[in-house]
Image: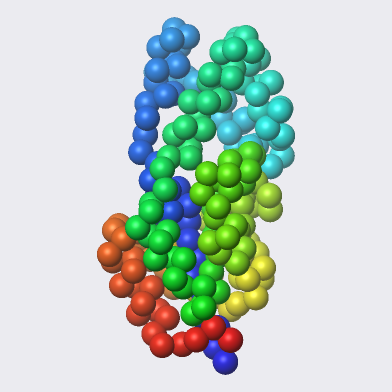
Amino acid sequence: MESRCVVFDIGGVLEMTPATGWDVAWEQRLGLPPGSMRQRLGDVWNAGSIGTITEHEVRERVAADLGLGPVQTEAFMADLWEEYLGSPNEELIDYVRTLGSRCRLGILSNSFVGAREREEKLYGFGDLVDDIVYSHEIGISKPEAAAFDVTCARLGVKPADCLFIDDCSVNVAAAEAAGMRGLLFESNAETVKSIETHLGHRCRP
């Protein structure tokens, strides 16, 4: 029997993550030119997103590159995580909880070292879906095709049976190129409608 599957992004879909302006505030606090912090820490952010650096090493690099003491470093990282984690999209999450008997459920997220522990503590995504694929754990980020291949393999499904939902059009296009059906997240109502159309009346095998 055909096995339908729905795969969600986290930030901007299951979590609402509006910009808090924390980076601009820190640039002003440290007397840095606008945009310079991103340039200084670009390599650190990239390494953290594919897991080639530990969370402890991230803190050390941030402190060294910005000249921060221990207290400032903790405050800096707290501000970073506040924006990263955002707030739960409760309406969509509640709906997803009803889907477990109807299809396979997964998450594919471009993430950062430390994300799994924090998101599990706050939101319990591990109980929401069958598997969570984090870029910092597999060493691959969307929109690379391999990220979608790994997700399908871990969920035990074919790409053609998957609906992938993301708030980034580049990632949606990449999922479609990998053989999935793609949906650009714009609202909960449209997302629920698209999922229902994708699932139809098929039951989970």
Q: Is residue 21 above or below residue 113?
A: above
State the colouring used for the structure image.
rainbow
On screen, residue 169 versus residue 30, left or right, reads: left
- Which residue is depicted at the point 40% across and 12% down? 28
Q: x and y percent of residue 94 in the render?
A: 41, 61
Is residue 148 at all visible to an observer of this figure? no
**Quadrant for the N terminus in the image:** bottom right
On screen, residue 43 versus residue 81, left or right, reads: right
Q: x and y percent of residue 185 in the render?
A: 35, 59
Q: Quadrant of residue 21?
A: top left
Q: Quadrant of residue 151?
A: bottom right
Q: Nearer the viewer, residue 89 or 194?
A: 89
- Which residue is depicted at the point 65% across and 75% down? 156
- Which residue is depicted at the point 58% across and 44% down? 121
**Quadrant for the C terminus in the image:** bottom right
On screen, residue 189 versus residue 128, left or right, reads: left
Q: x and y percent of residue 127 in the render?
A: 58, 60
Q: Nearer the viewer, residue 98 or 130?
A: 98
